[in-house]
Image: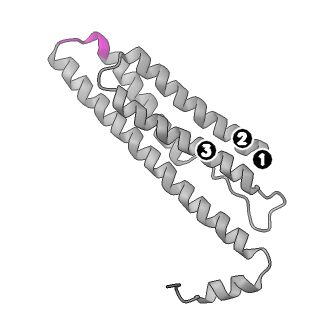
Amino acid sequence: MEREKNIFDKIGSLIPGYRGYADRDGRRRCDKLLRNRVVEQIHKCESIIDDRQTREIREKNLDALTDLEQCRKRLNSLSSKVQFAPYGESGFFGDSQIKEEELSEIYQHDLDLLQQTDLLIELIENTPVEDILQFVERLYAILAARSDYIAECR
């Protein structure tokens, strides 16, 4: 059973090219949801690091605390960068329009970020802190590649 067309659907059917614009807008909303999920996963990583810091304090392994705190700070900064990263969008009447293939590439970067943060959650509990920091730097590299790609598209 199909839903009844609302006024926007009716107007959209009368405007050439509107359907593609609406599809792109839906994909942008999906991109925002995906990046929000990445931010949630990064926050989960921070929480695991906090727990690990508490454990290290209890075990009187104070040498690891500085590196763990550095890792937690890098993750916190990364979550802000992901949350406020530019969208792969361009205005409807703008001079440059980001094409469908370009949007797909941007979304692939976001998906890579999500998959890598999921993997980090699995590794973070028992992995040496130096390896965690290297992993976090890979996340930064994915985000930088995403930002560079968007800049090239504009």
Q: Residue at x 52, y 31 (%)?
A: 139
Q: For the magenta stretch, what is the residue range?
A: 60-64
Q: Quickly name the residue at label 2.
A: 149
Name above or below for residue 131 compared with residue 124.
Answer: above
Q: Residues within 10 Å of mark 1 (few under 14, many from 20)?
A: some
Q: Give the prevailing secondary structure in the magenta stretch.
A: loop
Magenta stretch holds residue 39: no
| Number of on-image labels | 3
The amino acid on which the numbered mark 3 sits, given as a three-letter code, is: Gln
Q: Residue at x 34, y 39 (%)?
A: 44
Q: Residue furthest front?
A: 1
* Label 3, label 2: how far apart the Cα atoms are: 11 Å
Between disc 3 and disc 2, whose residue precedes?
Answer: 3
Tell me where residue 69 sits by quadrant.
top left
Circle nearer the viewer, 3 or 1: 3
The amino acid on which the numbered mark 2 sits, given as a three-letter code, is: Tyr
| Residue 100 % position (x, y) | 73, 56
